[in-house]
């Protein structure tokens, strides 16, 4: 958290005139999309669309689980190997914003949708 506070302060000082600052924390593929609504919603989704990150503290498979939703539809999860820092940030009340970064027709479900997560200051 100290690292985020230091960077937050630096961003604030660098852009004192800006209303808000966003710092990108990670870019990730969407995990588990083949099991959820991505296929049926594919034609409606666009790069830049907002995604909701919902913490699942009671998830029996992963105590750091973060569900990814688009307009109330479950799309999948933040990959397990990449979710610990984001889970801790959400648990501490940090304001995270996620957006679709890339959409691809790739047959590999791990290559179909990538998203970016930002810390909003």
Image: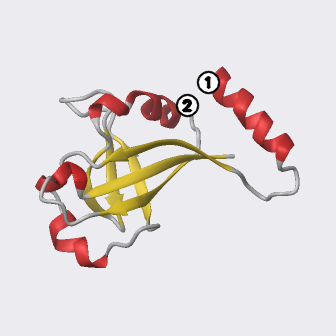
Is residue 17 depicted above or below 29 in this figure? below
Instruction: Say whether residue 43 is left or right of residue 4.
Output: left
Is residue 107 depicted above or below 83 in this figure? below
Q: Within 10 Å of the Cα at label 2, are there few (<14), some (14-19), or many (20+) other Cα atoms? A: few
- Write down the residue under mark 2: 92
Circle 1: element type: loop
- Write down the residue under mark 1: 1
Q: Quadrant of residue 33?
A: bottom left
Circle 2: element type: loop
Q: Between marks 2 and 1, how big is the CA–CA gap? A: 9 Å
Residue 90 coordinates in the image, percent (x, y): 49, 37
Q: Nearer the viewer, residue 76 or 107?
A: 107
The residue drawn where x is 57% and y is 37% is 93
- Point out the frontmost of discs 2 and 1: 1
For the view shown, which residue lies furthest in the bottom direction? 44
Is residue 36 depicted above or below 2 in this figure? below
The residue drawn where x is 69% and y is 46% is 121
Q: Are marks 2 and 1 in contact (CB under 8 Å)?
A: yes
Q: Nearer the viewer, residue 120 or 7?
A: 7
The residue drawn where x is 28% and y is 49% is 30
């Amino acid at each position: 958290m100290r690292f985020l506070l230091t960077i937050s302060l630096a961003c604030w000082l660098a852009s004192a005139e800006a209303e808000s600052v966003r710092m990108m924390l990670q870019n990730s593929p969407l995990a588990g999309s083949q099991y959820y609504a991505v296929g049926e919603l594919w034609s409606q989704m666009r790069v830049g669309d907002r995604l909701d990150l919902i913490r699942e503290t009671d998830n029996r498979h992963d105590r750091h689980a973060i569900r990814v939703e688009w307009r109330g539809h479950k799309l999948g999860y933040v990959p397990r190997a990449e979710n610990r820092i984001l889970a801790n940030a959400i648990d501490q009340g940090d304001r995270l914003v996620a957006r679709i970064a890339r959409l691809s027709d790739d047959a590999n479900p791990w290559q179909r949708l990538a998203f970016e997560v930002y810390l909003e200051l």
